[in-house]
Amino acid sequence: VQLVESGGGLVQPGGSLRLSCAASERIVGINTMAWYRQAPGKQRELVAAMTTGGNTKYVDSVKGRFTISRDNAKNTVNLQMNSLKPEDTAVYYCNVGLGTTLSTLVGSWGQGTQVTVSS
């Protein structure tokens, strides 16, 4: 499954961005779509995930600021990011896991979309 992320950019602290990710094909069955990010010199980390049924989880650092959503019919997942902080600066990627976990990813890592939070 090919994934294409978009929507990143440069934003001031406290600002907002909306990221989008489109999958090249429909993933049949229960699955989990997720956003990851990788900051310079750091490992890629899971930011938010959402199952086909609508269950969500977030990394503690973004709870209350980020909201993940998905459109199962369009094979897309979005990430609304509010109250952005400089520490949110990273390249953001999406991927898809089979079932309700992310232990088996089926997407090819794309180029991601750069989010830079700076004044």
Image: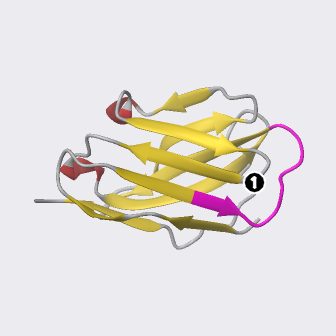
Kindly indicate the quadrant of the structure image that contains residue 109.
bottom right
Query: Residue 58 appears at what percent x and percent y?
Result: 47, 32
| Rendered residue at 53%/39% (across/down) | 68
Magenta residues? 21-30
Q: Is residue 16 left or right of residue 38?
A: left
Q: Is residue 21 left or right of residue 62?
A: right
Which amino acid type corresponds to the residue marked 1 in the rendered image?
Lys
- Whether residue 44 appears in this view of the structure is no
Is residue 81 placed above or below 100 in the rendered structure? below
Residue 69 in the image: state x and y as whole percent: 58, 40
Name the foreground residue: 51 vs 10.
Answer: 10
Residue 77: percent from left, percent from top: 62, 49
Question: Quick check: 24 above or below 96?
Answer: below
Which residue is pictured at 59% across the width and 29% down the height?
56
Residue 91 colored in magenta in the image: no
Mark 1: which secondary structure?
loop
Q: Relative to 74, is 47 above or below?
A: above
Position of the N terminus, as image quadrant, is: bottom right
Q: Let me know if residue 114 appears in the view.
A: yes
Q: Which residue is mark 1?
A: 74
